[in-house]
Image (tube, rainbow, N blue to C red):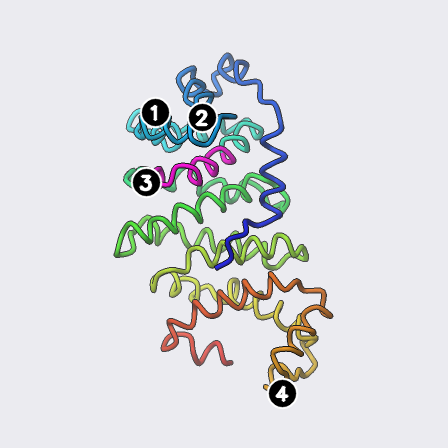
Amino acid sequence: MSLDPPTYLSSVQNNIRARPIPWEGAVRTGTITDQDLKKIKAVDKVRKEQRRQTVEADFEAYKSLLLGGDSERSVLESASKRADVIQYILVLTGDLLNDVPDLASTLLDHQDPYKPFLPLLTHSTNLDDPIPLLTSSVLATLISSAQTKFPKSTPKTEEALPKLYKYLSGLTKSQDSGLQDLAVQEYSAVLRTKKSRELFWKQRKDTVAPLLEILRTAAGAGKDTESTLWSGAMSIRSATEAGIGGAIGLQLLYHILLVIWQLSFEGALIGKGLQE
């Protein structure tokens, strides 16, 4: 798999990191608590090693901050009316998951680890809205970690995957190659198990069909025209050149083909349908 982070996502995250947040004002208005602020400041704008040590010293505190507890809401739920705070916390959550690998495992021990995030996928129908975009990245990381942590698929993960797939399918149907590539990379991150691939195939009209349409465009095949790629007469080299000519980036093509390859592990289920 590609190790390069999606360029589009990195740009959005960097813009949000650079924005000043009036944290003390957020505390005064009750958007977040003073304890929330102390936890945030302890890991915000600090060196990676310091961030890791702080979180590892109190995993439970950061699980409570991000997911809530029995008697308290998560910071994302508390700040539901402040889009700027939600965006910043989502970026910080992504940074924490990347910088503190064991944090994901701790969060997944929560009784409902996806609860604060799933509603944010439908925050807006605007594809440029950073909130669902950032949320999908966090969810993809958590679900991918869950697939490693738990040998068998969990009910909560099976409930979350279709919602994530639905959001990402909207990105693949857009005309923005950056959004398309982001979605495809997140698909790839979670297609690690038999169940995730089965659920993906179950939603194939929204998940698989747009990917095949991108491949058709790359091959120069319109909906009502024949293509030498689909007839098998086109070489790998000529297909690549067609991709360039079709204004489809090679990185996006690679990631789509990777997803198709991951699906191929369920050949008995999808083989005939994919051929059709």
Quick one: label 4, few (<14), some, or many (20+) residues within 10 Å?
few
Q: Which residue is mark 3?
A: 112
Quick one: label 3, few (<14), some, or many (20+) residues within 10 Å?
some
Sooner in the amino-acid sequence: mark 3 or mark 4: 3
**Distance between the alpha carbons at the discs numbered 2 and 3:** 24 Å
* Amino acid tagged 1: Glu
Sooner in the amino-acid sequence: mark 3 or mark 1: 1
Which residue appears at 33% of the width and 53% of the height? 147
Q: Which residues are magenta?
A: 90-105
Q: Which residue is mark 4?
A: 233
Which residue appears at 55% of the width and 39% of the height? 131
Q: Nearer the viewer, mark 2 or mark 3?
A: 2
Q: Which residue is mark 2?
A: 43
Q: Quadrant of residue 209?
A: bottom right
Sooner in the amino-acid sequence: mark 4 or mark 1: 1
Per the picture, the main secondary structure of the magenta-coloured stretch is helix
Left or right of 35 in this view: 136: right
Instruction: Check if mark 3's residue and mark 1's residue have beta carbons within 8 Å.
Output: no
Q: Nearer the viewer, mark 1 or mark 2?
A: 2
**Distance between the alpha carbons at the discs numbered 4 and 2:** 56 Å
Instruction: Check if mark 3's residue and mark 4's residue have beta carbons within 8 Å.
Output: no
Quick one: label 1, few (<14), some, or many (20+) residues within 10 Å?
few
The percent coordinates of residue 152 (x first, y second) are: 26, 56
The percent coordinates of residue 204 (x first, y second) are: 48, 67
Residue furthest out toward the left: 151
Left or right of 261 in this view: 69: left
Q: Is residue 99 magenta?
A: yes
Q: Which residue is mark 1?
A: 72
Q: Quadrant of residue 254?
A: bottom right
**Helix, strand or loop under label 1:** loop
**Distance between the alpha carbons at the discs numbered 3 and 1:** 14 Å
